[in-house]
Amino acid sequence: MGQIRVYGGRPLQGTVRISGAKNAVLPVMVASLLTEEPCYLQEVPRLLDVVTCCHLLRSLGTEISWQGREMVLSTPRLAGIEAPYEYVRQMRASFLVAGPLLARAGRAVVALPGGCAIGSRPVDQHLKGLAAMGANIEVAHGLVRAHCRRLRGASIYLDLPSVGATENLIMAASLADGVTVIENAACEPEVVDLANFLTAMGARVSGAGTRTVRIEGVRRLSGGRHTVIPDRIEAGTYLVAVAATGGRVRLENVIAEHLTAVTAKLQELGARISATGSTLVIEREPGGYPASNVRALPYPGFPTDLQPQMAALLTQAEGVSVITDNVFDSRFLYTEELRRMGANIRNEGRSAIIGGPTPLTGAQVRATDLRAGAALVIAGLVAEGETEIGQIHHLERGYEDLVGKLSSLGAVIGYTAPKSHFLGA
Ligand code: EPZ
């Protein structure tokens, strides 16, 4: 695996088109398991996680093909009911197959996700909801084994508004016998996108996007057509990058209302942002940022998936800024890498304390997770000199053509060939 090299100090200028949302397309692809009929998806982003999801679904019997830029998924019959650790380890969203497999086949064997670089990743809320719907669940040897004759509707209160648990349970409930009500559900736009796709398949889902979702189970679902919503986290990453480097960039294929918390924060920091239809334009001169506090919360709060990127920007703010992540318990591994670039940042529990402004200098760093990688790219765009970022497979999981898109905006960025450790000294 190669590295990404970034040379800092240039403003970003031009137009970038935002791709379909990683965190919407994954549950939507998994939802195709709920029907024997073909499903047609537009705006599927070219991401490593989409490839992993294709491998997982194919192992379960799904036929996947492309008609131009349209992905076609069809599972006329299931060939398996297991999501082995090799997939779950690579991509935690693999756990979303549990609900659909139980709903369709009455059985599921899914590996428990381990922890990861952003904290412990339990699935207790997923399991609590499936058990409430009548699934018999056994957890042993790192596997969740579940079975039931037919899921039945239930009232479920989530201890916390888990995105994945909400999505898993909506999918399971769509074929259950009776009505399911999920309280304290996640409201993220990606949950709404999944609900819209399920509705196109004939499911009866109401309240998606609010804290209370009601699903009236049906006997069967048909295939459906769906256009995946734009990726608000990709868009937010570019907005933060422009705020950090200065410049003027037009983002196309954006739903501005999904980014309100982000655009409001960036405007506090002096960025000028205007929205017209599905386009956002951001403009900012470099420098002169006031210190600011960011609190990552469930939607519609500031997204946890953009807090690392904000940290990179706030290294340039004048004064002390504090970023607190109330969603994940340890999503600050990236602070070590930013410190190596000269940032005055330290992690205290669920917060990062950032003193600024500090001039950043290019260095060799590594991406510890997808969004940490994005933070390092932004830091590299601001730093003096060259930054080389390793472990870039993390970035390729969630950003379509990041290097190409940033290059088209004037960034000096590219891939370096993997270093061969066997040639020469
Ligand atoms: C989704 O992860 C996203 N991934 C994450 O994006 C995102 O950060 C997260 O939601 C929060 O918005 C996908 O959609 C594929 P959660 P998910 O269940 O579903 C705890 C990215 O960078 N929890 O809402 O795993 C959990 O430990 C990724 O694109 C339980 O305690 O998130 C965490 O602290 C990273 N028990 C919090 O809830 C459970 O059963 C939020 O988790 C489930 C979760």
Image: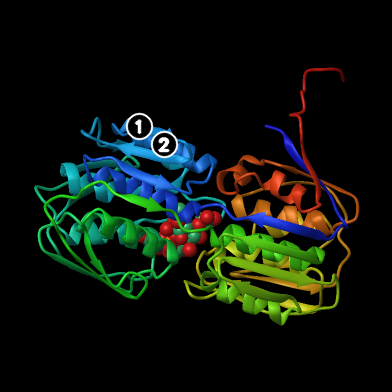
Beta carbon of the mark 1 residue lies under 8 A of ligand 1: no
**Residues at discs 2 and 1 in contact (Cβ within 8 Å):** yes
Nearest the viewer among 248 and 332 is 248
**Count the marks: how many?**
2
Circle number at residue 214 = none
Relative to 115, 110 lies left or right? left
Nearest the viewer among 368 and 383 is 383
- Residue at the top extreme? 423
| Residue 416 appearing in the image | yes
| Residue 330 appearing in the image | no
Q: Quadrant of residue 304?
A: bottom right
User: Which image quadrant shows ligand 1?
Assistant: bottom left
What residue is pinned by disc 1? 58
Position of the C terminus by quadrant: top right
- Badge 2 local density, few (<14 within 10 Å), some, or many (20+)? many
Q: Residue at x 26, y 59 (%)?
A: 199
Nearest the viewer among 258 and 69 is 69
**Does residue 296 sit above or below 24 in this rendering?**
below
Position of the N terminus by quadrant: top right
Mark 1, secondary structure of its residue: helix
Give the amino acid at mark 2. Answer: Cys
Give the amino acid at mark 1. Answer: Arg
Mark 2, secondary structure of its residue: helix
Q: Residue at x 86, y 60 (%)?
A: 360
Q: Quadrant of residue 15?
A: bottom right
What residue is pinned by disc 2? 54
Nearest the viewer among 9 and 367 is 9
Q: Position of residue 249 (x, y in %)?
A: 73, 63
Distance from the alpha carbon under mark 2 to that under mark 1: 6 Å
Relative to 126, 264 lies left or right? right
